[in-house]
Amino acid sequence: MPEPGGDIVYVLPDKLGGLFSFCDNLLAHRRPGGLRHRAVLTHNRLSSDVRGDEPLPADEQVTVENELPFENVYAALRRVRDAVAGEGALVAHDWIELAAASAYPVDRTVFSIVHGDFDYYYELAQRHEPEIDVYVTYTTAIFERLLEVLPHRRDTIFLRRYGVRIGGMRRPQPGPLRLIYSGRLDRAKGVFDLPPIDRMLRDSGVDVRWTVQGTGPHEAELRKAWPQPDIQWMGRREMSEVLSGYERQDVLVMPSRNEGLPVALLEAGAAGVVPVVSDLRSGVREVVENGQSGYRAAPGDIRAFADAIATLARDRDGLERMSGAIRAVVSRDWNIVTNAAEYEALFERWPELRRQRRSTPRRLYGSRLDRPWLPNALVRAIRRARGPAASRQEA
């Protein structure tokens, strides 16, 4: 329920991943006695994404479900609008809450978190500029790019690094180099580069042991392509187990083609696990200094990944130096204790940061069947009769 005097509402998709961890960390480290925090999770019943089964550490959590593209988009947006009713801060992470704020203007100050250096997020930032009061970026690369896209909004674009827990340190062990991939098992994450990297290492005599942490839509296909018997497939684990597991690893391997700033990179780095990661412009360079606190390789350059790992395997003293360096960087710049307080302080400025905005609704989404006055049951029946393909194409 809305809190008198204002509260902070986080709206995010109900699916496992870095965004979920981002919000979990911020909520878990808010200060006692501050504004009330609520979480509104949006879930598409037709989605195959893995849902987060651990509740967020908010004062209240609700889930708003939809069946897009079958139903009237404005019926789904009304449900989101009703869930965020009240005054205070609305912390937006994706399109549906911004669409709800455009179709049904809300009384909240809208903070839009720009989660990646992708056209998707910049286009969303431009499309919903009238509804967005404050933009928040967490890397310098994204901050500078957003300034180029929206130069006239300079005073309302903030850089706030997010953070992770700084826990135990990895324990060096003799023997095979311990490698971990941690994240979603999805082609877009470059996971099918892992088997050829492994083959190159073994062919060159480098003794390694792999742990694969996570699940995703291409897990079965990856297992088939990578039948090596000594791989430890961890699947989905509770966050406490994931974090403690980094203490038993040496190197994090992340060959993603497309990424924001991976939470797993920071979590592993906090434990001193040395990263060998794709050199993505979204902010990886702000964490990994090449050759000093890890290695960056061009996305898709399998040989460069294998060579960097082989170098670490053959130079254990260098591995230990880099391990200390990456932990120091994460502890200094990406500590959740410090950074969560900065986010909370920004959100609590919602009364002064609210901009003048138009009160007339803007209908930015949908087709001819998506109208606020059309009965949702009728729209759903028509689209189901047409079939999924036709519904997606129309929407």
Image (cartoon, rainbow, N blue to C red):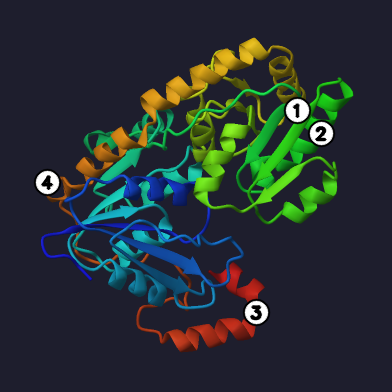
Which badge, 3 or 4, comes first in the chain's sequence?
Answer: 4
> Which of the two residues, 140 or 70, is positioned nearer the viewer here?
140
Residue 196: mark in rendering = 2
Q: Amino acid at mark 3?
A: Gly
Disc 2 packing (10 Å; few <14; some 14–19; many ≥20): some
Q: Secondary structure at mark 2?
A: helix
| Distance of label 2 from label 3 (alpha carbons) | 40 Å
Answer whether residue 119 is visible to the viewer in this image: yes
The residue labelled by disc 4 is: 352
| Distance of label 3 from label 1 (alpha carbons) | 41 Å
Q: Residue 267 in the image: state x and y as whole percent.
A: 50, 36
Residue 387: mark in rendering = 3
Q: Secondary structure at mark 3?
A: loop
Q: Residue 3 in the image: state x and y as whole percent.
A: 17, 65
| Distance of label 2 from label 4 (alpha carbons) | 54 Å
Which badge, 2 or 3, comes first in the chain's sequence?
Answer: 2
Q: Amino acid at mark 2?
A: Pro
Residue 302: mark in rendering = 1
Q: Residue at x 23, y 71 (%)?
A: 1
Disc 1 packing (10 Å; few <14; some 14–19; many ≥20): some
**Do the CB atoms of the residues marked 2 and 1 lie less than 8 Å apart?**
yes
